Image (cartoon, helix red, strand yellow):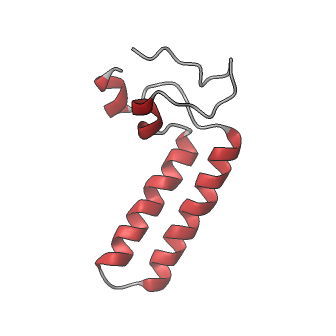
Amino acid sequence: MDIKKLVTLTFDKNVGTADRALRLASGLALVGAAWWLRPGAGSWALGLLGLMWTATGVLSRCSIYYLLGRSTCPAGGSGSSDRD
């Protein structure tokens, strides 16, 4: 594992198509729920979580998957990375 790659998100894509779609849909739902709840720290936390979840779907890169050495990308695709 390379810390520089982790911090800069330059590791290979490790979020597959189905996982990506689920992250995008659920992340946007969390952002929508946070907007609907409006005031309070809970809505800010929910919105931040939703934005982070959506970002992992947009970028197709998940830092937690990288730390665990996992990938939901198909074998031989862009998710087959060399993990140091």
Vertically, is 18 above or below 54?
A: above
The image quarter containing residue 64 is top left
Vertically, is 39 above or below 79?
A: below
Quarter of the C terminus within the rendering: top left
Q: Residue at x 59, y 53 (%)?
A: 23
Observer-nearest residue: 55 or 79? Answer: 79
Picture coordinates of residue 2, whole percent (x, y): 33, 20
The image quarter containing residue 7 is top left
Q: Residue at x 68, y 21 (%)?
A: 75
Q: Could you tell whether 17 is left or right of 37 in the image?
A: right
Picture coordinates of residue 31, whole percent (x, y): 50, 69
Q: Residue at x 54, y 60 (%)?
A: 27
Observer-nearest residue: 42 or 10? Answer: 42
Q: Could you tell whether 46 is left or right of 70 in the image?
A: left
Q: Residue at x 59, y 25 (%)?
A: 79
Quarter of the N terminus within the rendering: top left
Q: Could you tell whether 19 is left or right of 33 in the image?
A: right
Vertically, is 74 above or below 59?
A: above
Picture coordinates of residue 14, whole percent (x, y): 55, 32
